[in-house]
Amino acid sequence: MAETLKLQAPSAGHWAPAVVLAWLIPGGGHFLLKRPGRGAVLGISVLLVFLLGLMMRGMLFQPQGGDLLTMVIYYGGFIGDLLAGILYFLTVWLGYAQPDMAGHVHDYGTKFLVAAGLLNLLAMVDAWEIATGKKD
Amino acid sequence: MGNRHREKGLTVPKMNLSHFEASLLFALFTSAVLGVITKRTDRERVRYAVQCFAYFLAAIFGLSWLMYLGHG
């Protein structure tokens, strides 16, 4: 009977805590995986980008229907904002409500808020790769 | 009247950055994250982050000049 080589993917229980923590607390996944240096750089970068976005009075996206382009922008932006984890939840909970306004500073602020979430997504993927043994 | 204090919500210090300053800060933090997540040793990470930042700077100055010259 021929033996078949089965490549088993690591179970979700192995990597999920690190990825969820990486989402909720930027850099937290790396701290859990005992990579504090990298976690600190990632956490501080995401935090500062998010804070700069707030200080530039960026807008937080809300899901909005309508034509396809509007849906892509608003749902995409909302997901991007949401990826910043606790920074997003705290900001909403504390009542930050900046309306969409004209001006390059507000516009940059909005982009910075989404960019913070996207940078955190990269950190989450990195935490997943470390937790599953794909990298050190 | 009771809701008047809640109208503004969270207030954070306001910052007015120019296009260049905002681009520079974005480039700095993005380069740091890209350096950390893409390479395997600290030396490679620093090198790649600096390299990314240099590319960002080149793109900022290049596109700025392009737009300036394009406007005539």
Image (cartoon, grey):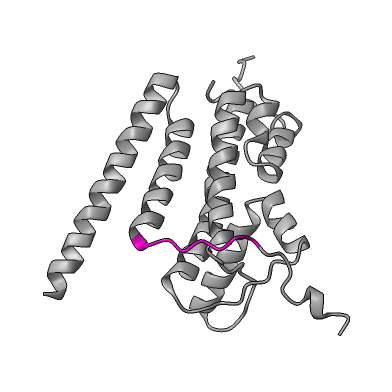
Residue A123 location, x and y as percent? 56, 39
Q: Which residues are magenta?
A: B12-19
Which residue is painted at 68% across and 71% down in the image? A97
Q: Position of residue A53 (x, y in %)?
A: 54, 59
Residue furthest right in the image: B2
Image check: B65 left or right of A123? Answer: left
Where's residue A22, x and y in %? 66, 39
Quarter-of-image position of residue A32: top right
Q: Residue at x 64, y 61 (%)?
A: B12
The C terminus of chain B lies in quadrant: bottom left
A105 over B50 or under it: above or below: below
Residue A132 visible in the current orientation: no
**Nearest to the observer: residue A93 or residue A14:** A93
| Position of the N terminus of chain B by quadrant | bottom right
| Residue at x 51% of width, y 63% of height | A109
* B67 lies left or right of A110: left
Chief secondary structure of the magenta span?
A: loop
Name the spot of residue A132 as percent of width and height, x first. Answer: 62, 27
Membership of B15 in magenta stretch = yes
